[in-house]
Structure formats: C-alpha cells, structure tokens
Image (tube, rainbow, N blue to C red):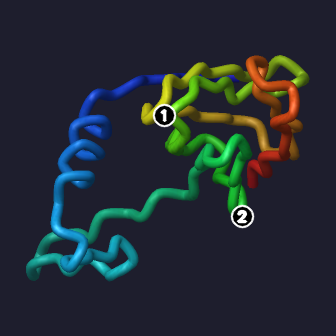
Amino acid sequence: MRISARATLIPLVLFGLAACSDDSESSSTDSPTTAAPGESTPTAPSGGVTIAGFGFNTGDGVTAGEAFTITNDDPASHTFTDVGGAFSVSLSGGQEVTLTVDEPGTYEVVCQIHSSMSGTLTVN
C-alpha cells in the first residue's frame, strides 16, 4: 500500500490571515469553479478528514488511490492512526497533512495521543 504524507506551511499562513480578516466578508468554497473556454475545470477533492473538538470527522469517506487532506483544527497535536497498521500520521495543532490510501475498506482510526478519540474512515 502506498502512503504519502506531506505537511504544509501554507495552511498555517492562510489560517493566520483568515483570523485577521473582517468577519463581515464571507467566501464559500462550495461555489463551482468556472473555467475559461478551452480550459478544464479543477477536480474537487474526494473528501477529507477534519480533527476538531478532540474528535474525527471523516464525512462520507475518501476515494481509494486519491490524495486527501487531514486538517487538525484543534490547538493540540493528534495522530490519525489505523489500528491495523495501514497508516499513521501526526499533526500539530492547526496543521494539514495529505494522505493516500490505496486499498478500499473501512478503517478503524484512533489518536495515539488521546485514547478517547476514535472513529472510522471509509475508503471507496
């Protein structure tokens, strides 16, 4: 199984800029992207995972073989670890990591730092 994890600093900078922005302005990431004639429209990510309030939100799952982002919205560090050993990533507070899981299935995930955190990740 191929697994890649890449921490980025850009989300930290963007988070800092968002914290300084005017709350009266809002933007939506749900609006469709319009491409100029002859250009392709970017593909939406297959899903992702958010860690917030010392819990995992895995949504509707992710697509096998496609990279997805794990975002730690907590100030504390966490891990996103498959109990079967297929993957494990560590995230500092406010950090994002990219992960790819090649094998479809349902994975039981835990935080190795905080034993009360558990959930499931569906890989379609």
20 shown above or below 114: below
Relative to residue 57, is residue 69 drawn left or right?
left
Cα–Cα gap, marks 1 and 2: 17 Å
At label 1, the amino acid type is Thr
Residue 72 versus residue 85: which sits nearer the camera? 72
Mark 1 lies on residue: 98
Residue 77, relative to residue 68: is it above or below? above
Q: Quadrant of residue 61?
A: bottom right
Q: Residue at x 55, y 39 (%)?
A: 74
| Three-letter amino acid code at the position of disc 2 | Asp
Residue 52 at x, y = what percent?
A: 61, 47
Q: Residue 87 location in percent, x, y?
A: 72, 22
- Residue 41 in the image: state x and y as whole percent: 27, 71
Q: Residues within 10 Å of mark 2 (few under 14, many from 20)?
A: some
Taking depth in this image into account, of 95 and 30 the one nearest to the observer is 95
Which quarter of the rendered picture does the N terminus lie within? top right
Earlier sequence position, callout 1 versus callout 2: 2
Question: Residue shown at 25%/77% (left/top)?
Answer: 26
Q: Is residue 43 left or right of residue 17?
A: right
What secondary structure is marked by label 1? Answer: strand
Name the residue rendered at 51%, 33% in the picture.
Answer: 75
Mark 1 in CB contact with mark 2 (< 8 angstroms) = no
Q: Is residue 4 left or right of residue 59?
A: left
Q: Secondary structure at mark 2?
A: loop
Disc 2 marks which residue?
Answer: 60
Checking the image for residue 39, the label placed there is none
